[in-house]
């Protein structure tokens, strides 16, 4: 029930989001929204000298606890990893980390940040963008 | 928008109505279940209402005893089906005080009815130099079609804004009149997002002074606000059955006969024709000209049964009861810390209460309420321009109907308190 969904770790990430902020002149950047509930997420990436490793990553935006907490968790998950690796990261990995039962509608909230990050990497590095996020790139991103 | 609830509970109290919601609930089989172990508190009737047995039975009986296609066969069953279908049209005509059942076109829902007018009237009557006017309170269904047709025909598109109280700012009308030939004004009688009851009669008068037609979206009004197209002075009026105890898949458009007769058709195909020749096709009479293909027959009959049901209770009594509920809800919600209430005072609103709880996202509030068995809507309510005006991405919305009881509002408030504790 409500307590399962809003378990401690989700509330913690929601109330104290990790990597919240903006990187000026980021190497990669994208914004996305979930038109259903109006969640908004912008993600900024800075690469290390090798041009591949995610040296710093931040997000800004507003939205429901699920979208903001999952994006916060994502920030911790991807830092220090390679762009290609994140492009291939299956959504299940993030969902396992979130670890709460989600209805199809809330799934969109939970996966918004990951989708936006994949679009940012796709734009900057040409990494593949899976089918399910292709529409996000064309329709909902500024 | 001001962050203080803008209502005065002193003016809200009206005489107690005679409607007995507790008794009426027994007509609705959906309430015979629990959600997460708790009785279902369905506070989302503005998006769609639940269905009484009377409507379900009427449709089932029709399917079991009189079903055939209408206006087709010469056999008894088809004649019977046609008679029932046309009787439903008469009920709809009476429900909106139309001067003739010929002015009633069955559509899929209010959205299709408005699209019918936007395409069949708008495409041929709008052009450069003309202006289509909508309001900031419109549902997308009465906004997007006009925006689209205006763009397609080169006409201008203007919006009447809101006052701080969440009511239409009629001061916007005068400047709009100087921007071109106002040809169509589109407005909802009741706002689905805030519950505001709009001064449609006044706006229709202004529209006619400009030589424009007035198109009224009554989807949110029809369930609980008496409709009289003669008194409103409008030219078209649209509503859906599913919000007023009827089935999905059917709605109605009322239009002035002379306008309907002058209009081009909308959907093309079977039934709407007079003569089909390789070189040319001519159209059937109104309303059949607008009813191509097999109609939602059982659904129209269900709509007729819903009208019978509402009229037996009394639409005025439903409205009065909902205003009492809205006043009670506004009073109780006012107790919750960090709550922001939107919309006008209860005496100028339908049974709809929109609110936000501090910075907590409405989806989180709605999810916590769901675990308590309380169903409310969270989102933009198909009113993105309005959400922009309010400066929010979404709101929570609790909406009431003839089967809503006060205990459900108490449970709503308790659930919100819980959400505030958990996420605030």
Image: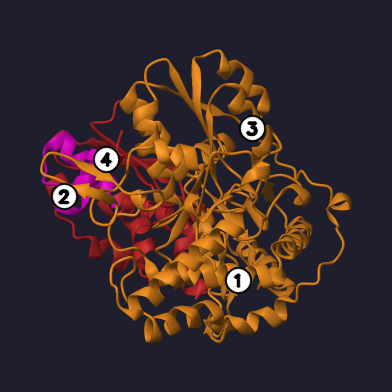
Secondary structure under tag 4 reads: helix
Q: Closer to the camera, A136 or B206?
A: B206
Judge depth for marks 1 and 4 and give the one in front: 1
Relative image position of residue B212 (x, y in whole percent) = 53, 27
Q: Which chain carries label 3?
A: B
How is the rendered protein coloured? by chain
Q: Closer to the camera, B342 or B57?
A: B57
Which numbered disc covers residue A139? 4
Q: Mark 1 points at which residue?
A: B308
Tell which chain the image draws in red: A
Q: Mark 3 points at which residue?
A: B203
What's the CA distance linking mark 3 and mark 2?
Answer: 55 Å
The reply to whether dot 2 and dot 4 touch (C-beta < 8 Å) is no
Q: Which chain carries label 1?
A: B
Secondary structure under tag 2 reads: helix
Place residue B374 in its image quadrant. bottom right
Tell which chain the image draws in orange: B
Alpha-carbon neighbours of circle 1 within 10 Å: few (<14), some, or many (≥20)? some
Secondary structure under tag 3 reads: helix
Quadrant location of the N terminus of chain B in the rendered image: top right
Check chain identity for marks 3 and 2: say if they share one.
no
Which numbered disc covers residue A87? 2
Relative image position of residue B334 (x, y in whole percent) = 76, 55
Judge depth for marks 2 and 4 and give the one in front: 4
Which one is earlier in the sequence, the residue at label 2 or at label 4?
A: 2
Query: Which region is colored magenta?
Result: A114-139
Check chain identity for marks 3 and 4: say if they share one.
no
The secondary structure that dominates the magenta segment is: helix
Residue at (28% x, 57% y) in the render: B271
């Amino acid at each position: 029930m409500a307590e399962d969904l809003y378990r401690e770790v989700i509330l913690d990430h929601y109330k104290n989001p990790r990597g919240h902020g903006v990187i000026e002149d980021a190497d990669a950047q994208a914004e996305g929204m979930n038109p259903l509930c109006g969640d908004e997420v912008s993600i900024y990436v800075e690469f290390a000298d090798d041009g591949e490793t995610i040296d710093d990553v931040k997000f800004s935006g507003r939205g429901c606890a699920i979208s903001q907490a999952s994006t916060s968790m994502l920030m911790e998950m991807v830092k220090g990893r390679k762009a290609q690796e994140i492009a291939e990261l299956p959504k299940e990995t993030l969902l396992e980390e979130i670890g709460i039962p989600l209805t199809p509608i809330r799934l969109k909230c939970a996966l918004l940040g990951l989708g936006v990050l994949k679009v940012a990497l796709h734009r900057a590095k040409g990494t593949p963008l899976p089918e399910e996020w292709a529409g996000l790139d064309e329709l909902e991103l500024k | 928008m001001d962050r203080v609830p803008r209502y005065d509970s002193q003016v809200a109290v009206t005489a107690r109505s005679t409607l007995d919601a507790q008794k009426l609930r027994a007509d609705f089989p959906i309430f015979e279940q629990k959600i997460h172990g708790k009785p279902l508190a369905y506070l989302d009737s503005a998006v769609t209402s639940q269905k009484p047995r009377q409507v379900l039975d009427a449709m089932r009986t029709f399917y079991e005893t009189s079903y055939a296609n209408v206006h087709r066969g010469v056999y008894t069953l088809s004649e019977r089906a046609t008679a029932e279908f046309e009787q439903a049209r008469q009920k709809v005509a009476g429900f909106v005080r139309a001067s003739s059942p010929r002015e009633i076109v069955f559509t899929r829902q209010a959205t299709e009815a408005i699209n019918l007018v936007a395409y069949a009237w708008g495409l041929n009557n709008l052009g450069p130099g003309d202006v289509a006017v909508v309001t900031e309170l419109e549902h997308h269904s009465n906004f997007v079609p006009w925006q689209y047709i205006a763009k397609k025909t080169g006409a201008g598109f203007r919006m009447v804004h809101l006052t701080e109280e969440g009511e239409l700012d009629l001061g916007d009308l005068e400047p709009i009149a100087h921007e071109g030939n106002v040809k169509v004004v589109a407005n909802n009688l009741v706002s689905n997002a805030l519950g505001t009851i709009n001064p449609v009669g006044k706006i229709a008068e202004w529209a006619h002074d400009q030589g424009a037609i007035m198109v009224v979206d009554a989807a949110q009004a029809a369930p609980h606000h008496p409709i009289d197209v003669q008194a409103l002075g409008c030219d078209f009026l649209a509503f859906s059955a599913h919000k007023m105890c009827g089935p999905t898949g059917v709605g109605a458009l009322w239009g002035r006969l002379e306008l309907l007769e002058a209009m081009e058709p909308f959907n093309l195909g079977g039934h709407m024709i007079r003569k089909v020749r390789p070189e040319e096709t001519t159209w059937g009479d109104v309303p059949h000209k607008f009813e191509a293909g097999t109609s939602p027959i059982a659904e129209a009959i269900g709509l007729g049964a819903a009208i019978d049901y509402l009229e037996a209770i009394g639409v005025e009594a439903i409205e009065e009861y909902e205003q009492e509920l809205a006043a009670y809800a506004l009073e109780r919600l006012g107790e919750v810390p960090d709550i922001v209430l939107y919309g006008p005072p209860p005496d100028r609103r339908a049974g709809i209460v929109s609110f936000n709880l501090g910075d907590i996202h409405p989806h989180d509030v709605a999810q916590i309420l769901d675990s308590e068995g309380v169903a409310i809507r969270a989102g933009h309510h198909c009113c993105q321009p309005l959400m922009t005006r309010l400066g929010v991405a979404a709101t929570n919305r609790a909406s009431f109907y003839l089967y809503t009881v006060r205990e459900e509002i108490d449970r709503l408030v308790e659930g919100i308190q819980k959400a505030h504790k958990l996420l605030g």
